[in-house]
Structure formats: C-alpha cells, structure tokens
Amino acid sequence: MTERNADRNLIPNDVVSRTVDGASPVRAWREHLGFTQADIAARLGISQSAYAQQENSDRLRKSSREKIAAALGISAKQLDF
C-alpha cells in the first residue's frame, strides 16, 4: 500500500471529535474541510435542502455515500466509522 493510499483511509482527530459531539460523519468531514452545504450540493447537482437531508441521514445508500465522498475529495471508506 502506498503512503497516498494509506492517507485516504485516515480520519483526522477533528473529524472524530465532531462526530463524538453529535455531528454525522458527512457533516464532520464537510465542516473540517471548510465547505458549506451549498458548496457540496452544487458539486452533487442537487439543492442545498436535499443535501442537508442526506447529510443528516442515519443511513445513506452506498451510492449516495460514494457521491458525497467524491464531492468532499475523500474515500467512501472515510465516511464509514
């Protein structure tokens, strides 16, 4: 495994702390990376309110998780914790 691939599976402490404080993993990553909901919604081609529903969902479909991860620039595995 290359160092770059290993980094794609790491979870920053800030993201973990945000989830401990009650944020969903998607929200924690978005905030950590400095994006707004509107930023990610635009990348996904959906409305901000539709994205907000997905971000707050307890159970994302695999395809949605993969699309959101790509929009955030992370691997889908990094949302699974």
Image (cartoon, rainbow, N blue to C red):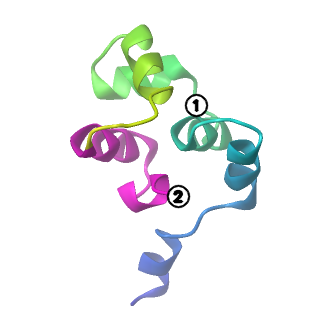
* Residue 63 among those drawn in magenta: yes
Number of numbered discs overlaid on the protein picture: 2
Is 9 placed above or below 78 here? below
The residue at 56%/44% (across/down) is 25
Mark linked to residue 35: 1
Q: Position of residue 69 (x, y in %)?
A: 39, 46
Q: Secondary structure at mark 2?
A: loop
**Seen from this angle, which residue lies furthest bottom?**
1
At horizontal 48% and vertical 70% (from top left) the residue drawn is 9
Quarter of the image for residue 13 reads bottom right
Q: Is residue 38 left or right of residue 63?
A: right
Residue 10 placement, left or right of 39: right
Mark closer to the chain start, 1 or 2:
1
Element class at badge 1: loop
Judged by its main secondary structure, the magenta piece is helix
Q: The N terminus appears in which quarter of the rendering?
A: bottom left
Instruction: Tell me if mark 1 has few (under 14), some (14-19) or many (20+) residues whose alpha carbon lies within 10 angstroms of its own.
Output: few
Expressed as whole percent of the image width and height from the top left, the position of residue 29 reads 58, 44
Q: Residue furthest front?
A: 58
Give the magenta range. 62-81
Q: Amino acid at mark 2?
A: Phe
Asked if residue 65 is positioned above or below residue 36 in the image, the reply reads: below
Of 65 and 41, nearer the camera is: 65
Residue matched to label 2: 81
Residue 76 location (% of width, % of height):
37, 55
The kind of residue on which mark 1 rests is Phe
Q: Residue at left 27%, top 39%?
A: 61
Residue closest to the eye, 12 or 54: 54
Q: Distance from label 1 to label 2 (Cα)?
A: 20 Å
Question: Is 44 placed above or below 62 here?
Answer: above
> Which residue is more in the foreground, 20 or 63?
20
